[in-house]
Image: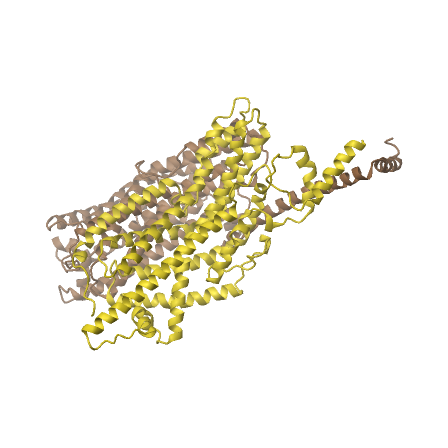
Amino acid sequence: MTGRESKLREILHQQVADEVFTPSADIPPTKEETFEFSLAANEKHTDYAKLDLFHRAVYPIMLLAQCFAIMPLTGVWEANPKRIRFAFKSIQMMFTIIFMVFSSILTLGTLKHLLKIGVNAKNFVGLVFFACVQSACIIFIDLARHWPPVIRYWTRTEMVFTRPPYEIPKTNLASRIRLAALIIIAMSIGEHALYLTSAIISYTKRRHICALTDNRTSSVVTFDAYMEENYSYVFQIVPYSPFIAVYVLLINGICTFIWNYMDLFIMMISKGLAYRFEQISTRIRKLESEQMIPESTFIEIREHYVKMCEILERVDNVMSSLILLSCVNNLYFVCYQLLNVFNKLRWPINYVYFWYSLLYLIGRCAFVFLTAAAINDESKSALGILRRVSTRSWCVEVERLIFQMTTQTVALSGKKFYFLTRRLLFGMAGTIVTYELVLLQFDEPNRRKGLLPLCA
Amino acid sequence: MKFLPRLRIKLRRLKKLAKSPLLRKLDLLHESKRKRVFQESCEAYQMQIEDEYEKASPIMQKIKLPYSTRERFLYDGTFHEAVGRVLLIAQFFAMMPVYGVTSKRPSNLQFSWRYLRTCWCLIFIASSLVDLGLSLYKVLNDPITFNSIKPIIFRACIFLVCVYSLNLARKWPKLMHYWDQIEQDLPQYQTQTEKWQMAHTIRMTMFVGMMLSFAEHLLSMLSAVNYSAYCNQSSDPIENYFLHTNDEIFYVFHYSNLLAVWGKLQNFYSTFIWNYMDIFVMIISIGLASKFRQLNDNLKKFKGMNMSPSYWSERRIQYRNICMLCDKMDNAISFITMVSFSNNLYFICVQLLRSLNNMPSIAHAVYFYFSLIFLIGRTLAVSLYSAWVHDESRLTLRYLRCVPKESWCAEVKRFSEEIASDMVALSGMKFFHLTRKLVLSVAGTIVTYELVLIQFHEDNDLWDCQQSYYF
């Protein structure tokens, strides 16, 4: 009695003394121990900040997005996802509404300008950009409304993946998401900087050259003159003043961020979901070496798989509009940029900017698509192992799991019209090439004209 | 010791004290863990109920029962009653002449060649055949282009749909009887709000569709009046208007008021039937999808619970029945679906091509863009509602995967395999199945055709006075 007692005492103290139950132990604790003594861990409040949760992984990026007037939620920095709230009467919401008012001024200006000079395929891109950003803003507000219950449900359900027998892979969720986000944000800042540089240098050079040939135009380059010429469509509606010019530049910058954030958000959600499916697949792969697998293991695995599918479906319902908008946006911009591939540009900086932005755009699209397709790939990757389960361990649950993996399309979708899988990326590439070949034919006469005269 | 409860309790306490403090502590922790697990599962259960209430309540709050009389309140959620008034309105426009559509039971439905509505339908078919003939004559005497065959396609579709719906009217009583039989067998609705949902959707669809098509017709009349004032062929503005809109009649005959009135009526009825084609397909889709939803709602209530094999067997048979009903309805209406889709595809292509030209006046531009957006919206609505049948039928699989291990039996296995391998959807004469994927491929097809047709587009004046003005 005393021997057993002292062993029990030891184990109880160990569990109570531990702050956090370390998930990746070398020797997995036996079932008996976890059943009887994990209640010690339950005695404490769950420390959400230390767990490998999706909410903790994405909160810095969501906070950054709130500075750019997107997804107005309160309490994102709190560790416990219960604290996230959406309220119409919050600072973030006010900020978003102010931004939307300003950007709609820009949109209307572009629209008016286009109606005046006539719409064609080339100058339509500005209007499409602003319309996409406005729609994205509205969709994100709607997403923010539905976000608190979704993230609470997600966190509640994924808690089971933070405990044994699920291990954290070599790179954990937070580092994966933050690294990818950092890369995309850095490259988009680079692209915006190059755009500004290219515009300013072109304008300066043009001013100098036109001043030499034509005595009327001065060669002095001022901020006011630059803004009035490049953003003439805004200053047709609103009178010019330096403050408004600075605001216009700010709004332009925020619009560019939002344009990138659409894809960034989809990428973060995809990584979060694919990570969990990867954990399930790893667990199934570890079973390959075992001789006799009890049926309870398979029951548990299937239950967790079904839970993940349900999270996916719930997230998909909330995110579908955003995915649809992002796909349409990407398709349009890639087609538009590819149309300009054979154009002649005046200065080398223009070429640098054009090729950087084209490659960045194509790279970003491909990256987001591949990340989203990874969910589908990960969900099916354990099929090979399951099919090789030995006859001794075979049971009805294995059969059910295989049936589920093969018949269900586990993937994000664009309002259930299409599913984001690898096959879709291939199909989209084919479609883009087809449309480009047709559209390039239309553009042939315009391109033959070459560069337009510099000074009007 | 059972007859001395107090002593037993005291002895139990003594027994507890005999344990060491550590074991007592463990016992306490066990108790609290059990309590916590119970509370948590209760909490989880409570949260699930709250969740479902959250999801369900906005929808429930939107639908208010429209009637307060007892008779209206006794609606049992059958399709036949929901669709009665809609079919009655269509019968005024010579579509599907079946007697007894507004009655309570489908056994009151009758079709006979001797009823007034059937004769009215036959008269209309004859008149539209004459109109089609005149139209053909006119078009064949002029050079044929992609745009000039528009009136022929319009009138031919109307004629085909009218003849087919007369045929459908003969089969309708039997179809409704079969539907009623299957409907009675399904798990019953629990609340009145649930019962009204299908009827509400059907009536709103009909109402919105008819209002929009009426608005479009008014705008077309306005635009035609404007246009005929511009291309004046005679001094009387009314005569101008009729000469312009019904030019195929006055190509052969001289102007007379009787012919003008006949032409106008023909025009009005044709526009209604052109819209009603799509609305009819939508209504049948809503009916079928609601039956699947009725079954799914019942499965949702018992999601994750241990049910007996007889429960699963019953549900499987009911699902199979609805699939057979879907198949029967598909056989009945697939011709109309096919005509409607081809019609929509053609008209969208033609109208998109026409939008590249300049509009002669603002009234015309307003009418043109309104009719184009209405056309695209209507096509999208038909595609999405008919794809709903397929989506709702696949949703059942979601509830089957939550069946726990203890109640997994051959019946559930058979059920889930059936759903996974079967294609339950409306179709266009079995050439294509109406799913969401089809909408995407149709959109892609339209864009491809447009890109090619734009090349053949000549910027000549398509709005000259010789063109047959259809819309």
Can you see residue B203? Answer: no
Name which residue lies at 66% across and 36% down: A34
Name which residue lies at 32% across and 45% down: A428
Q: Residue furthest top?
A: A391
Q: Position of residue B380 (x, y in %)?
A: 34, 49
Chain corresponding to yellow in the figure: A
Can you see residue A10? Answer: yes
Quarter occupied by residue A290: top right
Chain corresponding to brown in the figure: B
Quarter occupied by residue A294: top right
Q: Quadrant of the C terminus of chain A?
A: bottom left
Along the line of sight, the residue nearer the viewer: B94 or A122: A122
Horizontal side, residue B35 vs residue A202: left or right: right
Q: Position of residue B68 (x, y in %)?
A: 52, 55
Q: Is A225 located above or below residue B21 in the figure?
A: below
Q: Quadrant of the N terminus of chain A?
A: top right
